[in-house]
Image: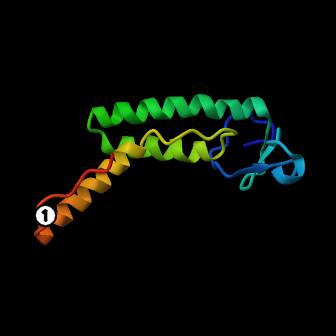
Amino acid sequence: MSKTDPQICPHLSLHGDEGPISRLGRMPVRWRCDECDAVFSEPQILQIHQALGEHERRAWDSLARCKFWMFGYHAALWVSLNRFSAQPRRNPFASLVSFARFHISESAAVRAGVQEATCPK
């Protein structure tokens, strides 16, 4: 990847190129990849927001079609991209994770002889 390539870096390992946020007093406008040294500007970071929506849509679509590997792939990409967002969003898969944790604890309780576990709200 060249340093002027407008595509989103595949490494997803970015840091602010202008210095720390504490010194700038704002989010950086230029970003640099830790692995390939590519430099990105704010409009390219906006592509991350578009990619977040696309990966969320694809993750839910994959789960609805019982394509669990693809769901994991798109959900993991969503989480990785969200880390670099200027305004990180709430994880749309958090309630699904809570349900899975409840199901595991309920199964463990049944095996241990406890009658019922209560579902977290």
Give the percent coordinates (x, y) of residue 109. 18, 65
- In the image, residue 121 sits, relative to residue 45, either above or below, namely below
- In the image, residue 42 sits, relative to residue 1, either above or below, namely above
Does residue 29 appear anywhere in the picture? Answer: yes
Give the percent coordinates (x, y) of residue 114. 13, 66
**What residue is shown at x 30% (from left), y 48% (from top)?**
99
**What residue is shown at x 57% (from left), y 32% (from top)?**
51
Give the tally of numbered discs: 1
**What residue is shown at x 42% (from left), y 32% (from top)?**
58
Q: Nearer the viewer, residue 38 or 17?
A: 17
Q: Secondary structure at mark 1?
A: helix
**What residue is shown at x 35% (from left), y 44% (from top)?**
96
Q: Nearer the viewer, residue 82 or 7?
A: 82
Q: Nearer the viewer, residue 87 or 65?
A: 87
> Could you tell me the amino acid type at mark 1?
Val
Look at the image and tell me in which quarter the C terminus lies. Answer: top left
Residue named by callout 1 = 110
- In the image, residue 88 sits, relative to residue 58, either above or below, namely below
Look at the image and tell me in which quarter the N terminus lies. Answer: top right
Residue 21 appears left or right of 100 = right
* Residue lying farthest to the bottom in this orientation: 112
The structure's colour scheme is rainbow
Where is residue 41, by image quadrant?
Answer: top right
Give the percent coordinates (x, y) of residue 4. 80, 37
Tell me the crowding category of disc 1: few under 14, some 14 to 19, or many 20 or more residues within 10 angstroms, Cα based: few
Does residue 20 appear anywhere in the picture? Answer: no
Residue 24 appears left or right of 59 = right
